[in-house]
Each structure stands twice: as structure tokens, then as C-alpha cells.
Image: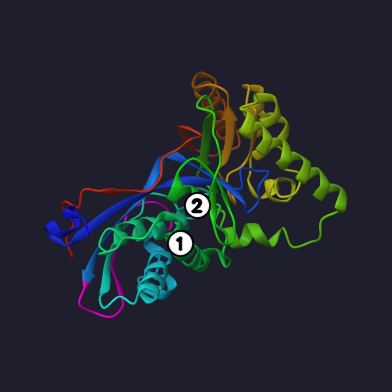
Amino acid sequence: MSEAARSDGWSRAFAPASVGNIGVGFDLLGFSIDGPRDVVSVRRSGGDGVRILRIEGDVPGARDLPLEAEANTAGRALLELRQAIGAGFGFDVVIEKGIALGSGLGGSAASCVAALVAANALLERPLSRDELYRFALDGESVSSGSRHGDNVAPMLLGGVVMALEDRMIPLPVPDWLWSVVVHPDQVLHTRRAREVLQAPYSLHDAVAQSRHLALFLTGLQREDRRLIGEGLRDVLVEPRRSSLIPGFDAVKAAALDSGALGASISGAGPSVFAWFESRDLADAAGHAMQQAFANAGFASRCYLSPVAGPRSESLPATGVSA
């Protein structure tokens, strides 16, 4: 158990927002961003379960989240962790939501990752990030209905990560790569966004997507701008989901016209992301992308971040009360 956790009984951690899929890697790739975040405080309790004491935050959807541990992403993750390690104690939890639900920024995943990192600091023998991964998948599944790690993995490790069923693989990221993520005042829940993907895909499209993924991964490995740009093209998911996001086509066009290597839907949407080869290009493009959403009738928030974004970390456990 860390000294900070012993001082007042609470352990506190944040999890950053993330971009799932990265367009070409559906349910496989994701990257974290330096932007909004969830913060979760955890302490040991004398009980034999998990109690969510309260959920704070004024972001959309925060007030509708369940306090019942089994139905909450953070609560479910901690229940699974507790059972796996055979803990003789329970957990009390306070969640501070900073990432809107239905934003395409990993709002459901962030709470469970932050909760796990905070709780891990309370253990006599803390687990590795790789060991925490399966509990994060358990938590994420409560919201999305499936065990996919494209949000929780980059939150746990930072940067760009390949999220498999049983492990996370961090990928190399050139330090000149920057991202813009624009979140409009729209809500698009993951379950709704998955419904449009039910119809079969053609072999031609599947082969094209595989080609783009190969180019994209090779481009990252070689730090090759051209290959990254050629690969960052989603021919499977984006065409079916784009109509669910009013203004998407214009926002993507604004990004590409501003020099983006590629642009697509962030996670399930409605946020839109784009990658650039410099901070200056990304900064200018963010304004253009926001204007495109404004022209469609939507206010938005813009987040500028290195693609090699942060990972979830512990915070000072000050000011936390039951």
C-alpha cells in the first residue's frame, strides 16, 4: 500500500479520454489524449463488496449513472478485482465524471480504469497494468455490451495501443504526431452506433480495410507520414456511422483541407478526430473543424494533444470525503 493511500485511507487516480478504433482499427486500436478526464477515489472498507458513495460532475450523462456496483463500470471492475485477489475487504468509491457519456471519448471506460488504478495503490501487492487489463474489460462491458479494449488499453498504457482479448501491445508513436479531437454538443451511445454495423460486409471492403490497417501500422513503425496517411482510411465503419453525426462530412473535409494525414470518427462518435504532422497544423485545423460543426448548428469543444497521450496515474488523495 502506498504512503499516500495510508495517510487518509483514500487513493485517487485519473484516467484520460481516449479515441477508440482510430478509424482503421475497429475494436482493436486506440490512443489517449491530453484533454478531459475522469477522477475516481477509492478506500478500503470493512464490508465484503463495493459501494459507490456518490457520482459527481456536470457533464452530460453523469447524473444518470447507476450507484449499484454491478451496473456501474467502475463498480463492476472493482468487484471482479476483489474476487480475483480474494480480498478480505471491500471498497468505497467516489466518481468525479469529467468525460461526457455518449461522446466517443471513452466516457464509460475512464471510470473503471481510474477506479482500478486507485484501488491498486491500496493493495499490499499491487498488480501490473497488464494484470489490471482484464478487470478493465469487465467494467467496460457493462456499458458497451462487449469486451473490447480499444479505450481502456490506451488509458492504462498511454499513447497508441493495440488491444487484444487477452493483452495490450503498445505501438511506437512519432513525437511529431499531433491530434485534434472535436466534440460537438451531440450524444451518440455506443449501443446505438453498433446497431448500424450488423449487416454483412463485402469481401472487397474487408480486404481494403486490411490493406489500410497494414499501411497504418507500418507507417507508425517507420515514422512514415505518407504511409500513416494512406492507411488512416476507414471503409467499413465510418460510411455506416457518419450519417448518425450531423455535420460529420463537413468537419472531416475541414480537417483534410487543413493538412490532416487522416480523419475519422472518434470511437462510436459523435466526436471527430484528425492526425497532423505538427502542432501548428493541428491547432489551425481545430478551429476549422469547430466552425464546420457550428455551420451545422452545433457548438463544440476542441482538444489538442500529442498522439502519444498520457496514461492513467495516481493523484494526491486530498480533500476526499465520504
Residue 314 part of the magenta segment:
no
- For disc 1, the neighbor class at 10 Å (few under 14, some 14 to 19, many from 20) is many
Position above or below: 52 against 296: below
The residue located at (59%, 33%) in the rendering is: 274
Q: Is residue 282 left or right of residue 156?
A: right
**Could you tell me residue 295's position as x and y percent?**
59, 32
Q: Seen from this angle, which residue lies furthest left?
A: 7
The residue located at (38%, 48%) in the rendering is: 312
Residue 53 part of the magenta segment:
yes
Q: Looking at numbered disc 2 in the image, what kind of residue is underneath it? A: Ala
Image quarter (top left, top right, bottom left or bottom right) of the N terminus: bottom left
The residue located at (79%, 61%) in the rendering is: 199
Q: CA distance from mark 1 to mark 2?
A: 8 Å
Position above or below: 313 against 82: above
Q: Is residue 69 left or right of residue 202?
A: left
Residue to which mark 1 is pinned:
136
Give the quarter of the image for residue 260.
top right
Tell me whether the residue at label 1 lies in contact with that at label 2, contact meaning CB atoms closer than 8 angstroms. yes
Q: Of 315 and 2, which appears nearest the observer?
A: 2
Q: Looking at numbered disc 1 in the image, what kind of residue is underneath it? A: Ala
Residue to which mark 2 is pinned:
153
Q: In the rendered structure, which disc, 1 or 2, sits on the residue that comes first in sequence?
A: 1
- For disc 2, the neighbor class at 10 Å (few under 14, some 14 to 19, many from 20) is many
Q: Of 296 and 52, which appears nearest the observer?
A: 52
Helix, strand or loop status at disc 2: helix
Image quarter (top left, top right, bottom left or bottom right) of the C terminus: bottom left
Q: Is residue 104 left or right of residue 129?
A: right
**Could you tell me residue 115's position as x and y percent?**
34, 60
**Could you tell me residue 172's position as x and y percent?**
55, 36
Which numbered disc covers residue 24?
Answer: none
**Could you tell me residue 104's position as x and y percent?**
54, 49
User: What span is colored magenta in the figure?
Assistant: 45-61
